[in-house]
Amino acid sequence: MRIEELKPAAGSKKRKKRVGRGPGSGHGKTSCRGHKGQKARSSVNLPPGFEGGQMPLHRRIPKRGFNNKLFAKEYTIVNLKKIATIEDEDTITPELLLQRRLISKIAKDGVKILGDGQLNRAVTIKAHAFSKSALQKITEAGGKAEVI
């Protein structure tokens, strides 16, 4: 038997530090908490970022800009070049895109079609939103864009 053949591997299972077991253990008396102070007490429960009454860093730094998370639209985006890879369907829906794994999920507000790429045939695309360039390219190819 060699040292690398030991199971479990040597040093892979570390024992828990047992504090408060007398002076001989090296972790007796104050049990690794130091002397007195707030964190030495048994009922210490400090919130994250607490700085001992000093104004915490996340409140000292100025907040900038505007955040519209509450009313922001959340779409799964699909470009026309991905839709152009579907050759055997005339009507393209979000469910079809999901089934063909061109998208991984349908977002909260649905699917939005963007105009990157070209369509070389007429197709009917049903989606929740379209960009102006996507609408233009779909109509140029002789297809239809239907908002669900």
Image (tube, rainbow, N blue to C red):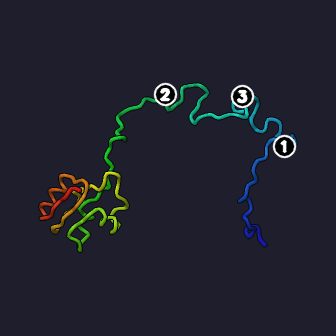
Q: Position of residue 81 (x, y in %)?
A: 25, 63
The residue that appears at 71% across and 28% down in the rendered structure is 37
The residue that appears at 21% across and 62% down in the rendered structure is 125
The residue that appears at 16% across and 59% down in the rendered structure is 137
Q: Position of residue 7 (x, y in %)?
A: 74, 67
Q: Which of the numbered marks, if any, corresponds to residue 60?
A: 2
SS category of the residue bearing label 1:
loop
3D distance between C-alphas at marks 3 and 2: 25 Å
Q: Which of the numbered marks, if any, corresponds to residue 21?
A: 1
Mark 1 against mark 2, which lies toward the viewer?
A: 1
Which residue corresponds to mark 3? Answer: 37
SS category of the residue bearing label 2:
helix
Q: Could you tell me the amino acid type at mark 2? A: Arg
Tell which residue pokes out farthest to the top in this image: 54
SS category of the residue bearing label 3:
loop
3D distance between C-alphas at marks 1 and 2: 43 Å
Q: Could you tell me the amino acid type at mark 1? A: Arg
Q: Could you tell me the amino acid type at mark 3? A: Gly
- Tell me which numbered mark, 3 or 1, is placed earlier along the sequence: 1
Quadrant of the rendering where the N terminus is positioned: bottom right
- 36 over 123 or under it: above or below: above
Q: Is residue 24 left or right of residue 31?
A: right
Characterize the local packing of mark 1: few (<14), some (14-19) or many (20 or more) Cα atoms within 10 angstroms: few
Q: Position of residue 117 (x, y in %)?
A: 22, 61
3D distance between C-alphas at marks 3 and 1: 21 Å
Report if the CB atoms under discs 3 and 2 are less than 8 Å apart. Answer: no
Q: Is residue 111 left or right of residue 134?
A: right
The residue that appears at 36% across and 37% down in the rendered structure is 67
Q: Position of residue 135 (x, y in %)?
A: 17, 56
- Tell me which numbered mark, 3 or 2, is placed earlier along the sequence: 3
